[in-house]
Image (tube, rainbow, N blue to C red):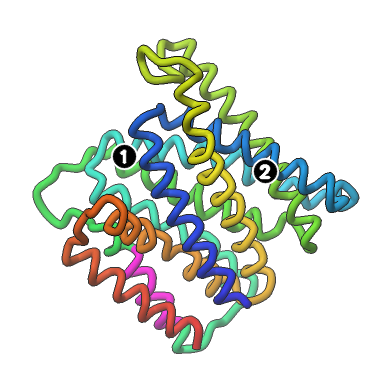
Amino acid sequence: MTVLFALATSLLWGLADFGGGLLTRRVPALTVVMASQTIAVVVLGMIVAATGGWTEWGPQLWFAVGAGLVGPVAMLAFYKALALGPMGVVSPLGSLGVAVPVGVGLLLGERPGVAQFAGIAVAVAGIVLAGGPELRGAPVQRQAVLLTLVAAFGFGGVMALIAEASSSLTGLFLALFVQRVTNVMAGGTALYVSVRRGGRALPEGSGMGVLWALVPALAFVGLADVAANGTYSVAAQNGPVTVAAVLSSVYPVVTALAAMAVLKERLRGIQAAGAGLALVGTVLLAS
């Protein structure tokens, strides 16, 4: 179950990142985050009401609040790092956040077998290479590296926090709802400050109509991201966190393959090698 749900997490996160990347070409990134998460809040609210999830209210939901506060900070740092570039450095470094939940698992006493330790090493190497790191040429600003590391460990922190936010399925729905409400509140504050400082919430010369036209795509991105958090929580609660975290972080491979299939982008040699290593690591971790 851990392997199945963790790989489902990678699929969902990879597709959500791909969809979000396409949307940010038309709408400012912060607006994409806000709109997609608002849709997720509405859907999750209905699910919580239908399943009676309100009865699961308890102190463990502070983990969901923490994840909701850390998530937007990590995402904004990541987008800022991408703007400073180069993407071939930022993207692989952003995958290093897997060290947070893996470290938590080891501190809690998990001791994977030799094959699984080898799988962790091989899979993490594959994840980094799948992002297509720049090995020469492009200069890298120190600020871009620092922002990327903030984003990476923020993403890892969200994985560690959301895994502790519930102990039942209905409780998971409530935890995800609380997390997304916190996301929207934090992201909305950031968007308000950005607009007050002269930033734009919508593309120049367009109105709300552009958002209404993109509602299906925004809903897909928001709900896929929520579902990924949910499947990761199930994976982490039903098996070793070290295995769940690494397998859930194979999503850069999914994003690269989606870009190849939809946008006809060609994988660089280093990305293809990374995808292969990630697959080998997955097999070792599943052993």
Q: Residue at x 74, y 52 (%)?
A: 173
Residue 1 shows up from this direction: yes
Residue 265 position, x and y percent, is 22, 54
Label tally: 2
Residue 3, located in which quarter of the rendered image?
bottom right
**Residue at (55% x, 37% y) in the render:** 36
Query: In the visual, does 156 lie left or right of 232?
Result: left
What kind of residue is marked 1? Leu
Residue at image point 80% right, 47% down: 48
Q: Horizontal and vertical percent for residue 37?
A: 59, 37
- Residue lying at the far right in this picture: please name it: 55
Dominant secondary structure, magenta: helix
Q: Position of residue 229 (x, y in %)?
A: 60, 55
Q: Quadrant of residue 85?
A: top left
The local crowd at label 1, few if under 14, some if 14 to 19, many if 20 or more residues have their Cα within 10 Å, is: some
Which SS class for mark 2?
helix
The residue segment tinted magenta is 117-127
Query: In this view of the protein, which residue sits in the foreground, 240 or 103?
Result: 240
Instruction: Point out the image quarter for the N terminus.
Output: bottom right
Write down the residue under mark 2: 179
Residue at image x 84%, y 53%? 51
Asked if residue 5 lies left or right of residue 127, the reply is: right
The disc at residue 82 is 1
Q: SS of the residue at dot 1?
A: helix
Mark 1 or mark 2: name the one nearer the start of the chain. 1
Question: How many angstroms separate mark 1 from mark 2 (CA)?
Answer: 25 Å
Q: Position of residue 115 (x, y in %)?
A: 44, 88
